[in-house]
Image: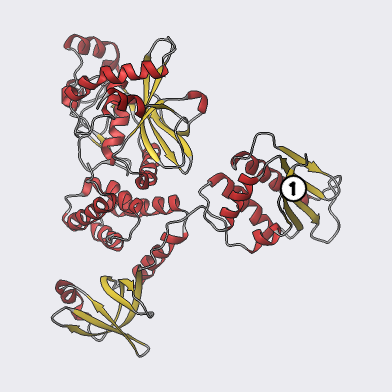
Amino acid sequence: MDNTTILNRIYKSYDNDLKENFVAAAIKYRSENHEVDHAGIAICLNENLYIFHFNGIGIRLDILDPKKWFIENKLDFIKSKEVASFFVYCEEISKECKPEYGYVYNGSFFLPDGKYFSEVEDYQFMTCVGFCINVLTGAIENNKYLLHEDWELADHEKGVYFEKYMEGILESIPESKRKILKNNQRRIDPMDYFTSSFVYEKPISKASIDSLKPSVEKAIRNKFGTN
Amino acid sequence: MSKERFEFKILNDKDGSETNLDNLSLRESKAFLVLLESMISIAENTGISDDFEIKIEKGSACVAIESSDLSPLVMEYSNILKNESNNAEAVQAFRNVQNLFWNNGLTYSSKIKTMSNVSSNIFNEISKARTFRTKSIKRSREYQITFLEGNLQEIGGKNPNFHIVKNGKTIKIECLEQEAQRIKDELYKTIRLSVIETKLANNRSLYKFIDFYRDVNDYKFYQNLIERTYEFDHLDFLREINKLVKDTLRSEDYTKTRQILKLFNNHFTDDSILKTILIITKHFSERSEIKHIRKSIKSILEKNRGEVLI
């Protein structure tokens, strides 16, 4: 995908026509320091724009406050006629699923009956990005949206992070499951997620994201940066 | 420049006495509150320009919106009257007014005045309309799911088919060989079934077998479900189908899941229903009871959208 196409595809929430339903990858961008620190899924349905995200405490499906805009890129694999189905699926997830915050992603996805498909079903640890990937993966036919094994935390990072944060949470979890969770610690950052929305070939490899990411970052900076 | 205006008025209390804003009965105050709240919501949600004012006026009890341009409101109102609006908030506001007009026994009037037109007939329009709801799924003109009950006769033929006889009228139904096998024990008995009806010219139709129901309650339930497909608000129907399929999956009643899926396994089912079914059954795609029908639903959706599902 060339730079002009990327530049043309990205837009601020509400800068796009809401007449036609769509689903879009959405990230929170701080124009003053170019930081991207949150991810969600934007859903335009019947001329309302919703944001579906995990804020670390709970799942939220709300009409997006125009003042709290995201940067969006439409997901072409969900057609406008399918958006209502996707929305109902998201409603189910927000009613039934109870994720907890943690840098773990093991190829899991949500099932709209509130169950969670994962090697470790009982413990739904995820980040805001992991949440989006769980949601998108549950809505497609394939069991993989991302080739998540491509992503890893550096080994030293894993240890430190576990000591500081996860160990405490995991204490009560049986050793066997703890191991799986530990082995599946990975950090897929919001820019990786956003860049994935430009990759046509699914499931998406880290290599394909890495090759596009600089162009996407540049496009965001050019279009929305303030310095 | 004079402003455009949309108003609701309470004229008389239930006992016929004239309504006066200075001195409202309990019933009148409740009605007034509904009208005021609805009016605010209508002003907020129909996209009229920001210069609008909400007026509360004496005489009878009157709430009104005034603005330089009410055309978005007029447009939305006309869509709501036809049940063709997707604006859930505005529909809800008008529905609240409609319920009030229907149920609480006071006398009202309502008027829209624009630069080009004055319409005083709003009260009648609202009270005579069907229950306001947002847009539902559109029926196909050519195809429909039809439910039939009658005596089963003459199963067979090179191109398998059978006849249903009711009140002396015979309907021929095409089927597959294995479907003919399935129903053969019902020969000369009353059978209840669902078919795809294809409407031809001259009021004639072709019928193709979908399923048959031993339990009369199932028959009625599915008949009702198909009715609701086109009556419910679009999103509400998807929620309904999602819940229905979810319940069968939770209770591991996969035969029932298949029974539901069969009714939507056709090219004229709305894409949103097909996609809802695919999402909810994703994790069960290898279950023998639903594997084939799910595959068929998937390929129908892929054909409709002109692209494979990833």
> Which quarter of the rendering shows the C terminus of chain B?
top left
Report crowding for label 1: few under 14, some 14 to 19, many 20 or more residues within 10 A (C-alpha).
many
In the picture shown, does residue B177 fall above or below B65? below
The x, y position of residue A58, in whole percent, is 41, 28
- Residue depicted at x 26% and y 78%: B173
- Residue depicted at x 47% and y 61%: B231
Secondary structure under tag 1 reads helix
Q: Toward the viewer: B103 or B146?
A: B146
Residue furthest toward the left?
B158
State the scheme by which the image is colored.
secondary structure
Answer yes or no: is residue A126 visible.
no
Q: Toward the viewer: B190 or B296?
A: B296
The x, y position of residue A161, in whole percent, is 26, 12
Answer yes or no: is residue B160 visible.
yes
In the picture shown, does residue A62 fall above or below A102? below
Q: Toward the viewer: A165 or A226?
A: A226
Quadrant in the rendering for residue A132: top left
Q: Chain of mark 1?
A: B
The x, y position of residue B223, in whole percent, is 38, 68
What amino acid is found at the position of numbered circle 1 in the picture?
Answer: Phe
In the picture of the structure, the residue carrying the numbered disc 1 is B32
In the picture shown, does residue B304 fall above or below B39? below
- Residue depicted at x 82% and y 48%: B24
- Residue depicted at x 64% and y 64%: B128
Residue furthest toward the bottom?
B168
| Left or right: B131 in relation to A181 | right
| Left or right: A39 in relation to B293 | right
Quadrant in the rendering for residue B221: bottom left
The x, y position of residue A98, in whole percent, is 36, 32
> Which quarter of the rendering shows the N terminus of chain B?
top right
Quadrant in the rendering for residue B257: bottom left
